[in-house]
Amino acid sequence: MKGLVGASALISIVLIACAKEPIAGRGTLAVHGTADEAIRIAVGQELDLTVGTVGPGEYVAPPSISSGALRFLDAQITGPHLPSGPTQLFRFQGQSRGIAVVAIRHSGNNPTIRDTVIVQ
């Protein structure tokens, strides 16, 4: 189990809030790090999630979103271009106050990313 946790941390560069509270205004919140963190954004604010993989495959768009509080905008492959696998940017926007659980599935063996987004 310890190896799985370590591998998971290496596999994903994902979803850690840069701040516990939303950034003022309607700017974009960029997030990098480890999974399973609550991310807070404001209604109308954009959320950029950067994820990375190790090995073949990529994270699949569109992701699953549990409520209409958050809207998926798009996904694209972005830099840095690493030999281990693609780096991807998933963009979302807060639509209404509420909580949404985002699940981003991988086409290969990397774990599914699941995180909670609180739209205030």
Image (cartoon, rainbow, N blue to C red):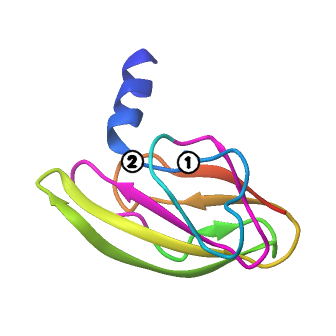
Indicate which disc, 1 or 2, sits on the residue closer to the N terminus.
Answer: 2
Residue at 36% x, 20% y is 3
In this figure, which residue is indicated by the disc labeled 2?
Answer: 13
| Residue projecting furthest to the right | 97
Left or right relative to 111: residue 38: right
Which stretch is magenta?
35-59
In the image, is residue 109 above or below residue 76? Answer: above
In the image, is residue 51 above or below residue 79? Answer: above
Residue 41 appears in the figure? yes
Quote the CA–CA distance across marks 1 and 2: 13 Å
The image quadrant of residue 65 is: bottom right
Residue 57 appears in the figure? no
Which mark identifies residue 109? none
The image quadrant of residue 25 is: bottom right
Left or right relative to 97: residue 8: left
Is label 2 in a helix, a strand or a loop?
Answer: loop
Residue at 30% x, 74% y is 77
- Three-letter code, disc 2: Ile
What x and y, as percent, mark residue 113? 53, 51
Residue at 64% x, 50% y is 115
* Nearest the eye: 93 or 59: 93
In the image, is residue 62 above or below residue 99? Answer: below
In the image, is residue 77 above or below residue 18? Answer: below
| Residue projecting furthest to the left | 83
Dot 1: within a 10 Å radius of its alpha carbon, few (fewer than 14), some, or many (20 or more) residues?
Answer: some
- Three-letter code, disc 1: Cys
Dot 2: within a 10 Å radius of its alpha carbon, few (fewer than 14), some, or many (20 or more) residues?
Answer: many
What x and y, as percent, mark residue 62? 54, 77
| Residue projecting furthest to the top | 2
In this figure, which residue is indicated by the disc labeled 1?
Answer: 18
What x and y, as percent, mark residue 81? 17, 63
